[in-house]
Amino acid sequence: MSNAGQPMFGTALDELGAVLARVDGDRIDAACKLLAEARQIVAYGCGREALQVKGFAMRLYHLGLPVSVVGDMTAPPVGQGDVFLVSSGPGETATVLTLMRIALEAGATVLLLTAQVGGSAASLADFTLLIPAQTMASDQGAQKTSVLPMGSVFEGALFLMFEIMVLKLRDMTAASPEAMRARHTNME
């Protein structure tokens, strides 16, 4: 068995660790508080970010929080007291910007995860959680900082950050591991 890929694993893990080390822990706690206190949470992301957001939404459901994903047939309208959790690494995704405006007009709080605090999405958001990683907006030329392609570092950092947020939310909501497991689907 060859271990030719092993140095790449180390590099990728080091890059993810460096990104997560720069995420503000107080902002993570504040984002968790927003989610824990929301009347309902509606989540959205584009492309591969959507996969991470959907995985997080599943865990929010396991925690017993009222959550849905934009595009699902059971997604409710958002309004006052709700949190629209949205990811846009590059900060300029047209669909994200449109949905943020809709959520804001309806009175929801917009919680944005992004790598671009100077982007259009950040200027609209009520609360921004910065994940300082390479995205599709910064994966070429002198801006390129990762061995991984396109937005992979941002997407990987999202996954790990969401898992830490699940642990923090589990403590905030006093959800037991047994209760979480009991909410897991039996339709697999």
Image (spheres, rainbow, N blue to C red):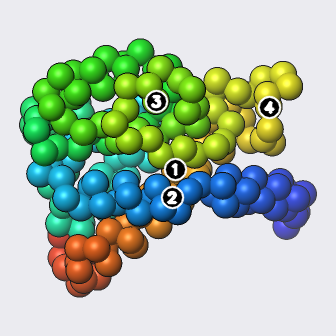
Q: Please tell me which of labels 3 and 2 falls first in the chain.
A: 3
Residue 183 screen position, x and y as percent: 18, 69
The residue that mark 4 highlights is: 144
* Left/right of residue 11 with respect to residue 175 in the rendered view: right
For the residues marked 4 and 2, what is the alpha-carbon distance in whole angstroms? 22 Å
Q: Residue flagged by tag 2: what amino acid is it?
A: Met
Neighbor class of circle 1 (other Cα within 10 Å; few <14, some 14-19, many 20+) is many
x and y percentages locating residue 65 in the rendered image: 18, 61
Residue under the point 30% across and 61% down: 33
Residue at 38% of width from left, 41% of height from top?
Answer: 127
Q: Could you tell me the amino acid type at mark 4?
A: Lys
Q: Is residue 165 visible?
A: yes
Q: Which residue is mark 3?
A: 122
Q: Quadrant of residue 61?
A: bottom left
Percent position of residue 116, x then y: 58, 31
Q: Nearer the viewer, residue 107 or 49?
A: 107
**In the rendered image, which quarter contains the N terminus?**
bottom right
Q: Earlier in the sequence, mark 1 or mark 3?
A: 3
Q: Nearer the viewer, mark 3 or mark 4?
A: 3
Label 2 near label 1: C-beta < 8 Å? Answer: yes
Q: Which residue is mark 2?
A: 161
Residue 158's tag is: 1
